[in-house]
Image (cartoon, rainbow, N blue to C red):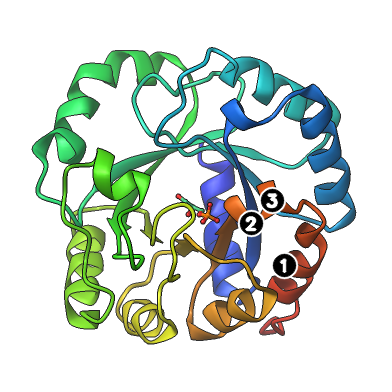
Amino acid sequence: KQALYNQFVEKKRTGRKSFAVLIDPDKVDDQKIAQLVRLATDAKVDYFFVGGSLVISSHLDDCIRQLKASCAIPVVLFPGSPSQVSKYADALLYLSLISGRNPELLIGQHVISAPFVKKSGLEIMPTGYMVVDGGAPTTVSYISNATPIPADKNDIAMCTAMAGEMLGMKLIYMDAGSGAKRPIPESMIEKVARHIEVPLIIGGGIIDPVKAYLNCKAGADVIVVGNAIEKDPTLIKELSAAVHSIPVQV
Ligand code: 1GP
């Protein structure tokens, strides 16, 4: 069961960029979800990512069921903890925090939740998760108890991503953290993209369509935006258009 991952790979092969809207289930009610679905469908958003570092409610299942019932956009779990697994989603980013040296987030929590995750029947996408310094501590940098990669250390980012890929990670996700003051610089994205073959997901602090476009130009395959859309959902249209404006290779 690798349907969604194969789609990621096929899109990368043809240079088709994707736009993902990140939803924190704790921050949306039914009405808000309905609005996001409307805007995202109109804007041809490629994926919903659902999760967050601090999801505390049991609203996760309901949120995903509503998304699945009201549109055809695939739902990918982006879990901040092993409790954020829902069988109603299409796939799970199985994150290992390879930029950090906290064994719990590299492998410990995976061991504890392995039978539960397997039983979910979800498509599992092993993901090398790299947190990059976003200019000020973000929730993920604090909660992970791990030092983010300094934003000007492109070589560290490159070597980390290469190691992740060689260890078998099928995706690399570089994240400046939700609401980051400074999103990941294009030079770092470019350096990492040139040295890996698996799809590259970029998120954290992206608020402007031009930055989303430049990230894609630099080699990002998937752009994720959460915070900016929470504040102004109508941004979905411009952000999605910017990501999709990159010409496809034939
Ligand atoms: C955070 O990459 C995501 O984990 C998205 O970040 O909320 O800043 O868009 P924002």
Mark 2–mark 1 Cα distance, whole angstroms, equals 10 Å
Q: Horizontal and vertical percent for residue 88?
A: 61, 20
Asked whether disc 2 touches disc 1, contact meaning CB atoms under 8 Å apart, the reply is: yes
Q: Is residue 96 above or below residue 151?
A: above
- Is the residue 12 above or below the residue 56 in the image? below
Quadrant of the frame with the C terminus: bottom right
Q: Nearer the viewer, mark 1 or mark 3?
A: 3
State the residue position of label 2: 228
Q: Whole-Å distance between the Cαs marked 1 and 3?
A: 14 Å
Q: Position of residue 129 (x, y in %)?
A: 31, 52
Q: Secondary structure at mark 2?
A: helix
Identify the residue under disc 3. Answer: 231
Callout 3: CB less than 8 Å from ligand 1: no
Q: Position of residue 246 (x, y in %)?
A: 69, 82
- Residue 201 image point, x, y percent: 47, 61
The residue shown at (67%, 46%) is 230
Going from N to C along the chain, the mark reached first, 1 or 3, is 3
Name the residue nearer the viewer: 54 or 86.
Answer: 54
Residue where numbered disc 1 is placed: 239
Disc 3: CA contacts within 10 A as few (<14), some (14-19) or many (>=20): few
Label 2 environment density (alpha carbons within 10 Å; few <14, some 14–19, many ≥20): many
Of 155 and 247, which appears nearest the observer?
A: 155
- Which amino acid type is shown beneath numbered disc 2? Ala
Tell whether 69 sits left or right of 49: right
Name above or below for residue 93 compared with residue 202. Answer: above
Type of the residue with mark 3: Lys
